[in-house]
Structure formats: C-alpha cells, structure tokens
Image (cartoon, helix red, strand yellow):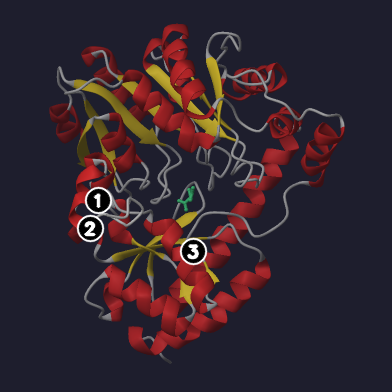
C-alpha cells in the first residue's frame, strides 16, 4: 500500500477537531470573496477603501528603515503600551499600568480569543448580546465556553433588563459587550453599562468590552469605557486596536487591558499563540496614538457624513434603515423586497445588482432572527458610494418604490 495515498474521507473527518466542525467560515470574509468574484461594490466587510493618514504610514516606513524589524517585547513594545495607557487616561479617565495591565496582540481578534482562553474553564458561560459580531461565537467554542445569548431588539436595539439578569448566574464567567456596536450601531448608555456592571460585580463576572469603534460616534452620542465605571477595574477587559481608528485594518495591531493577574494569564496565552504583533507597526501605532484630539473630531465628522450618505442611498433604494449612533455599519430591514430570506437576498444583491452586503443571519445564533436583515458598511470613499447608488437603483422596482 502506498503510504502517500489519501485516507478515505470519513477517517479524515474523524481526525479533525470537533470544535472546528461546530462553526463555519466567516460569512463576512466570504462576502468579500464573492464581491471580488462578481466584480461587486464591496459594502460587506468593514475595512476602509480610502488611504490611512500619511503621518502614520510614514512612521511605519521610518520604523522599518530604522531596523525595528525583530520581535518586539512579547506583550508589546514599550512605546506603544505607554501611548495606549496615556490615551486611555486622557480620553476615558482610566489610568492603567502599561507594565502590568496591557497586552498588545495581533488585532483585537487575537486580543479577544487570548482573553477568552485566559479566563475560561469547562462549564463556564459567557453572555453575548445578539446580534453579535460573528467572531464571538467561534471564540466561545474554541475557548470552551457555553454562550448564552441575550437579544438587542430593534428599532433602538435595547435589551430587556430582567432577561439579562436571568441569564447571569454562578456559572457566568463573562459578558462580551461591543460598544459602539457592530452590526447595530447601538452605543450603550451609562445606565445600561451600570446595570451590566452591577450584574458583573454581583456574580463576579468579567465584562470583556470590544471598544474598537470608540471614535465612530454620531449625533452627540458618547462612548463610555466599561473600565471607567466605579468598581469595574478588576472585572473589565478592554479590547481595542489601531485598525478602525487609524484606517489600518491590515496591520493587525490590537490590545487587551485588564487587571494585573488577568493580564498575566492573557500574556501567557498570547505569547504561545502568536509571540507578538508586527514590531515596526507597533512603533507606528505609538505615533498614531499621539495624534491630537482634532484627528478624532475630524474622523467623527467625516464618518457622520458617510453615514448620512449611505442612509440616503439605502433609503432611496427601498431599505428600511436602523440609523446607527456609532460604528460604521447600517443594519437594514429587507422585508419590503419580497425575498424569502437574507441569504437569498444577499446572493441576489451581489450577483445581479453588483453590491455586496452581509446577511443578517450571520450575526445571530438562530438564522431565523436575522432573516429580514442585511448589514452594509459605510467606511468607503465617495466614488464607491456613487457606484453603489447607481447599482442599487435597479432594486427600486422590487421594493415597489419606483416613481
Ligand atoms: N469587523 C469587520 C466587520 O465586521 C471585519 C473584521 C474582519 O473581517 N476581521 O466587517
């Protein structure tokens, strides 16, 4: 028998991880592939199609030229950790020790899975608001946590306090919170955060907050870091990254901020998962984090204009839109178009109309809950909006809004 011949299919599948079999590939990234395949305007995956700021690109080039090309300290270059701590103190009034409370990772994606692996034991439950950013499901499976979902309900994506309280219990290890929220655009209010804080304190649970959209904030909404609430420091893990704030999603530089003993555990997991994030890009990150307040003000203004542009295009094409107060996505209701479900609609949209969006079901545990939704991103330049608007014209007839 030839030892190189492939084994029969069923014995291969028995050799694979049962955990990996419990989730599918990312639908968001799949939509980007479909957009490329069909030449569609890609409004699915949330990455900017406009340039990153010149000064931080220059900082990255200079770091490489200066030969910052070997491993950084595993848990992050000191310059970057200091800059992160300084910015958090300046913007949220939270002071952290960059030597003991901060881990730089390969994007917030790695910060999240490293955190989960650092705190979860078999039998632990993790509360996740639904709809949720699709990574949190696989993160729970890979770390061995049992997810418990609590719905955010349209139109303003509020949660039922009693339902949330009933979901917490002695097995609750953590709640994952994304504010400003992907995909809904909800920005959690202080009272909501305080209610969650009280549950975390009562059940000795962590709040892992993904705050990556902190500067995409509209209509006077205010981003409040969970760690800034009284009593939350020992309970909070704050996750963030360069990706969205500085339009460098491909750099893969993110971080997790947590109390020293939690950080010690996160650092161990991180070290053996990835060793560290790209050293020259960490240096550039230190420069980025020192940009003046005017940078963030301008960013929010520009994103407000992009949001309004996209709301106009989608509403005109027949979508019912949930107006986001933060982040850079618009959740829509597609019931008016008469399609059986979100996946059929998204496929039609990418193949026949030439615009890619993300089917709502990929943000829900039960596909039925997302059946009438699709998500669009608006971190795009004007020529992209223009092209999308032209293509979406064709949809009007289907929505019965043809005039
Ligand atoms: N956060 C982005 C989104 O929701 C994508 C992130 C990613 O693909 N890694 O579209």
Q: Residue at x 30, y 80 (%)?
A: 337
Label 3 crowding class (10 Å Cα cut-off): few <14, some 14-19, many 20+?
A: many
- Distance from label 2 to label 3 (Cα)? 29 Å
| SS at mark 1 in the image | helix
State the SS at label 2: helix
Residue underneath mark 1:
12
Horizontal and vertical percent position of residue 41: 55, 72
* Separation of marks 1 and 3 at Cα, in angstroms: 29 Å
Mark 2 surroundings: few (<14), some (14-19) or many (≥20) residues within 10 A: few
178 left or right, relative to 306: left
- Which of label 1 and label 3 is nearer to you? 1
Viewport quadrant of the N terminus: bottom left
Task: Give the labeled residue for mark 3.
Answer: 32
Q: Is residue 245 left or right of residue 181?
A: right
Where residue 19 appears, as percent x and y from the top left, is 25, 40
Residue at the spot of label 2 = 9
Q: Quadrant of the C terminus?
A: bottom left
* Callouts 2 and 1 close, C-beta under 8 Å: yes
Above or below, 105 against 178 in this view is above
Q: Nearer the viewer, residue 268 or 16?
A: 16
Residue in the image at 32% along x and 60% along y? 360
Q: Residue at x 29, y 42 (%)?
A: 137
């Amino acid at each position: 028998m030839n030892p190189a011949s492939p084994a029969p299919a069923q014995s291969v599948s028995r050799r694979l991880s049962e955990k990996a079999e419990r989730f599918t590939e990312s639908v968001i990234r799949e939509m980007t592939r479909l957009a490329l395949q069909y030449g569609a305007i890609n409004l699915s995956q949330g990455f900017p199609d406009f340039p990153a700021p010149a000064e931080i690109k220059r900082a990255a080039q200079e770091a490489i030229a200066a030969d910052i090309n070997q491993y950084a300290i595993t848990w992050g270059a000191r310059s970057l950790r200091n800059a992160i701590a300084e910015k958090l103190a300046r913007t949220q009034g939270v002071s952290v020790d960059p030597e003991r409370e901060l881990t730089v990772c390969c994007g917030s994606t790695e910060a999240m899975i490293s955190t989960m692996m650092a705190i979860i034991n078999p039998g632990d439950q993790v509360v996740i608001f639904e709809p949720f950013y699709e990574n949190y499901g696989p993160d729970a499976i890979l770390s061995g946590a049992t997810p418990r979902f609590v719905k955010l309900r349209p139109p303003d994506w509020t949660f039922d306090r009693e339902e949330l309280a009933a979901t917490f219990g002695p097995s609750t290890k953590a709640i994952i919170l994304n504010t400003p929220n992907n995909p809904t655009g909800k920005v959690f209010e202080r009272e909501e955060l305080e209610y969650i804080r009280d549950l975390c304190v009562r059940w000795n649970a962590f709040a892992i907050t993904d705050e990556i959209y902190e500067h995409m904030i509209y209509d006077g909404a205010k981003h409040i870091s969970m760690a800034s609430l009284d009593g939350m420091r020992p309970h909070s893990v704050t996750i963030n990254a360069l990706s969205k704030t500085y339009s460098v999603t491909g750099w893969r530089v993110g971080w997790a901020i947590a109390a020293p003993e939690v950080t010690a555990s996160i650092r161990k997991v991180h070290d053996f998962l990835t060793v560290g994030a790209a050293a020259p890009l960490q240096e550039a990150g230190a420069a980025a984090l020192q940009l003046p307040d005017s940078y963030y003000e301008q960013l929010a203004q520009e994103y407000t204009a992009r949001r309004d542009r996209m709301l106009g295009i989608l509403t005109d094409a027949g979508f019912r839109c949930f107006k986001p107060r933060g982040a850079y996505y618009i959740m829509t209701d597609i019931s008016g178009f008469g399609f059986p479900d979100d996946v059929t609609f998204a496929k039609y949209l990418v193949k026949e109309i030439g615009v890619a969006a993300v089917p709502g079901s990929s943000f829900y545990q039960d596909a039925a809950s997302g059946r009438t939704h699709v998500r669009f991103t608006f971190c795009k330049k004007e020529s992209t909006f223009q092209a999308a608007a032209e293509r979406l014209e064709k949809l009007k007839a289907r929505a019965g809004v043809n005039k």
